[in-house]
Image: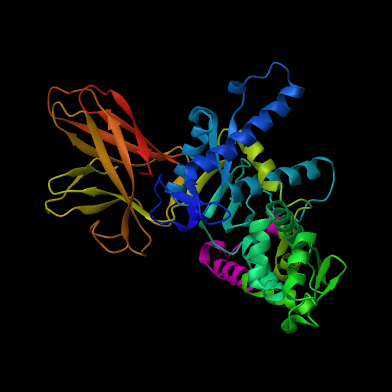
Amino acid sequence: MQLYKNRDLKKSLTIKDISGKKEMKAVDVFAACIEHLKNATFTRAKQQISNLEEEDIHWVLTVPAIWSEAARQFMIDAAEKSGINEDNLTLALEPEAAALCCKSLEIQKSDKGQNPKLGSFSSGSRFLVVDLGGGTVDITANEVMATGQIKEIHSASGGPWGGNMINSKMWSLLREIFGAEVVSTFTLKNREDYLDLVREIERQKRSFKSDSKCTIRIPGSLIVEVKKSNPDMIADKYKGKAEMRINKLQIFPEVLKLIFKEGIDKIIGYVQNLLNEPETSRVKSILLVGGYASCGLLVHAIQEHFNHLTVICPLQPDVIVLKGAVIMGHMETPIVGRMAKYHYGIALAGGEQKSNFDGSHTSFTTSKQEFYTIIPKGSPIQVNEVVTEYDFPIENNQEAANIQIYASEDKEPPKLISEVNCRKIGLIHIKLPRFRRTTKLRIMISNDETEFKVVAREEYTGRCFVGICRFLD
C-alpha cells in the first residue's frame, strides 16, 4: 500500500517493522520476499524436472493495474535485486491476468461440451474485472477480440477498499472489546500468537455471511492478558453483541454488517459510476476475483445490487490471478490495447521542433517549457505499436539525450509543465556516440504490456539507439 499511496515514490522509500520502531529500505524487503518465492518455486519445480536451470524460467510478477509507473518500476527493481534478470521478467496487471484465466476456463468448458456462463467471454463481449485484493480494489473494463486477445475499453481504476480495510476494522473492534492497551501488550509480547490471530481473522473474514455469527479463535496468551484487567473479558459496550465461548470470540451479525458496510458501499458505488460511463454501456458481466472475493457477504451484496448483470465469482477466486499470470507468460501478446490513464507528455523549450505523423512540423518559440502531448488521456494505446514520434536536436559531442516525461490527470492537457496538476513522472535516457556534427534523433515511443519502450533513429546515418525509460529516482 506504500507503493499505491506514495505519489512521489522514491527508491529510497523505507518501511517500518511490526513494532513501528525499526525501518528498512522497502526495496530490500520486497526483494527478500520475491527471492524467497523464487527460490522455493525453483526448488519445487526442479524436483519434477531434474535438468531445469534458472535461465529456463520466465518469471511473471503481478501488480495492481491502478499502480503508478513508478510503483511498477519499483517492483522491477526489487525483482532484479532478488536475482531475476529483467529479460526473464514480465509484469502482469492483475485484473487482466484474471480475465485471461477465466476466459481460458470458459473455453475449456465449451470444448468439453459444458455450458459456459452465457457467453461472457465470447468474441465481442464486454465485461468488468473487479480484483478484490488485500490492499486495493482494482477494476478494468475489457472487450474480447475475435483473435481471443483482450482489449481495455476504459482505463484501469479503483481505490484502497480491499480486504485489509476489513482486517483493520476487525482489529479496532478487538481493541474496543478487550481494551486497547491489553491488545497492544499482547501484540508486543507474543509475536507468534499475534501472527496466528492475524491469519485467523483473515480466514474468518473470507467466510463471513450476513446472517450468522463470526467465531474467532483467541490465543491463550491474549485471554490471560484480558483477564488481568477484565475477568468478564467483554467490554460493557459489547455485551449482547459479542461473547466468549471457552477460547472463542463470537461476534453477532449486526456488528459484522457495520464493519463491512463502508467498504462494500464504496466498491458498489464506484462500480456503478463506472458502468454509467459511455464506454461501458455494453458491459454485460462482472467478474469478481482476488482473495477478498472469497467473502460471501461482499459477493452477495454485489450480486444483489447488480442483479441485471451476470456476476461471476470463480470457485477459487484467490488463485485466479496466479493462474492467469502463468497463461500470460505463455502468450506473445495477450493484451492488444489499453486506455491512457493520464495525458502523457514531454517538456519542449523555445525553438524545439516536433515532427507530426503527417510529416509536417510544429515549432515552439516561447521560452517557457511547454507540455507536448505524446499520449492524450483516454486514448487507446495499441500494445507494441508506436504511439508517438518526434525530432530531438543533438549537438556535436553530446553523450546522451535526456527527455523528461510528464503526466496530468486533468480533463484537458496542460499547456505548460509548470501547471498545478502536471507532474514529472519519469525520464528517457538515450546513450549516444559522440556525433561530429549537429544532428537530429527521431524518437519513437511505444508501449508494451506494462511499460514504455523508446527507440531513437539518427537522421543522417539511420543508426538506432534504445532508450531507457525510468520512472523512479
Residue 79, relative to residue 248: is it above or below? above
Q: Position of residue 155 (x, y in %)?
A: 49, 56
Q: Residue at x 17, y 23 (%)?
A: 435
Q: Position of residue 86 (x, y in %)?
A: 49, 30
Decide whether residue 282 is among the magenta residues. yes
Quarter holding residue 267: bottom right
User: Which stretch did the figure color magenta?
Assistant: 265-292
Quarter holding residue 453: top left
Q: Position of residue 203 (x, y in %)?
A: 76, 57
Residue 140, relative to residue 247: is it above or below? above
The answer to whether any part of residue 18 appears in the image is: yes
Would residue 263 be found to the left or right of residue 110 on screen? Answer: left
Q: Position of residue 223 (x, y in %)?
A: 78, 66
Q: Residue at x 59, y 57 (%)?
A: 135
Q: Nearer the viewer, residue 328 or 380?
A: 328
Would residue 399 be found to the left or right of residue 280 on screen? Answer: left
Q: Residue furthest front?
A: 228
Q: Nearer the viewer, residue 152 or 313?
A: 313
Q: Residue at x 83, y 66 (%)?
A: 248
